[in-house]
Amino acid sequence: MESLDVVVVGAGVVGLAVARELASQGREVLILEQHARPGQETSSRNSGVIHSGIYYPTGSRKARMCVRGRELLYELCERRDIAHQRCGKIIVATESQRAALQILHRRGIANGVTDLQLLDAAAARRLEPQLACDAALLSPSTGIVDVHELLLAYQADLEGQGGAVVLQTRVESIEARKTGFVIVARSGDSSSELHCKWLVNCAGLSAVALLRQITGYPRLRWREAYFAKGTYFACQGVRPFQHLVYPMPNEASLGLHATLDLGGTTRFGPDVEWVSEPDYRVDSARAASFYAAIREYWPTIPDGSLQPAYAGVRPKLVGPGAAAADFEIEGPAAHGVPGLINLLGIESPGLTSSLALGEEVARLVSAA
């Protein structure tokens, strides 16, 4: 039975960032990933946006991790020549949303986003002539990143520091013992046992379900997983905006927004569809509701310009109608299992926050 310092479950962008940071401290780290490639679920099925930190309650883990993570991520992208662009974002508001927009502005400043600018309709149209709004908020420090390149950079750093990623390997059981954890993992037709002192659950969509596989984890802390599916449509042949454009947020998402990729394509999404389990099928019939939502800020979108792109699923700790939950980093002080750290409900801004989440987990391990 192989013995390691740390086993991380899940090779998404957060799992790789956590493992990378722990390996940089000289720990022997192994990631177990059930899919054939890192980042195959949530990490590669989102907007690829580097968020500035506007939306989240001041003092929340999301706010702190996003602002810190944004700084670390831009620095890494520049140092490692990872494709990215600090293109900026415009959040648009109608007349009835002016007060809410001002609250968002104040919250962003309180969170440490110091470059925000309130715009009137004329100023917004000078930046984006096709935009329709009564007021807007400009966030210059919002950007986009090539998620595939970022995943490769994280993995290269991990492996360069002696860590490893084992793909197509599913965790079958985990037993908590006084000396650490015994993990039974299956790859193909064979299974193997691993022993580790620290176990970090970064399983994303499967993170809540994994709790039930850990013998010794208190049943009273089991919880229900919720999944919010979001569909994206691409706008072919037209590039209406130079900035990202977002409507005002709602309780489940940041609204059906316009994002750019580094190849110049404009995408719209995600919408919100609550599902019982992850489902990546794209329903082309949802385009009708997209046109209606987009025309609130881009009235001249041509009919027939939207083409189905992809769908992603966000892991949620609360269901429809509930206020958004904060990131949860659940350590031994909360659940009583030495050496176990669970990262739960890591949705947006998880990509932006990934390096900061790595720092946070490393601090918990070092402090033990």
Image: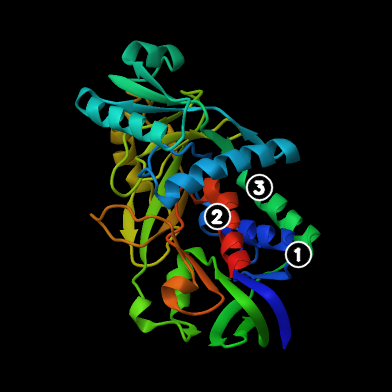
**Place of residue 41 in the rendered image (x, y in percent of width and height, measured from the top left):** 53, 59
Between the C-alphas of marks 1 and 3, the distance is 22 Å
Q: Amino acid at mark 1?
A: Gly
Look at the image and tell me whether residue 188 can be seen: no
Mark 2 surroundings within 10 Å by alpha-carbon count, few (fewer than 14), some (14 through 19), many (20 or more): many
Residue 357, disc: 2
User: Going by the picture, which residue comes out furthest to the left?
Assistant: 96
Residue 150, disc: 3
Of residue 56 and residue 188, the one placed in the foreground of this image is 56
Mark in front: 1 vs 2? 1
Of residue 182 and residue 359, the one placed in the foreground of this image is 359
Residue drawn at x 60%, y 67% as measured from the top left: 365
Residue 308: quadrant of the picture: top left
Mark in front: 2 vs 3? 2
Residue drawn at x 63%, y 56% as measured from the top left: 17
Q: Is residue 122 left or right of residue 34?
A: left
Colour convention of the picture: rainbow
Q: Is residue 52 left or right of residue 224?
A: right
Residue 26, disc: 1
Residue 31: quadrant of the picture: bottom right
Between the C-alphas of marks 2 and 3, the distance is 15 Å
Q: Amino acid at mark 2?
A: Leu
**Place of residue 85 in the rendered image (x, y in percent of width and height, measured from the top left):** 61, 31
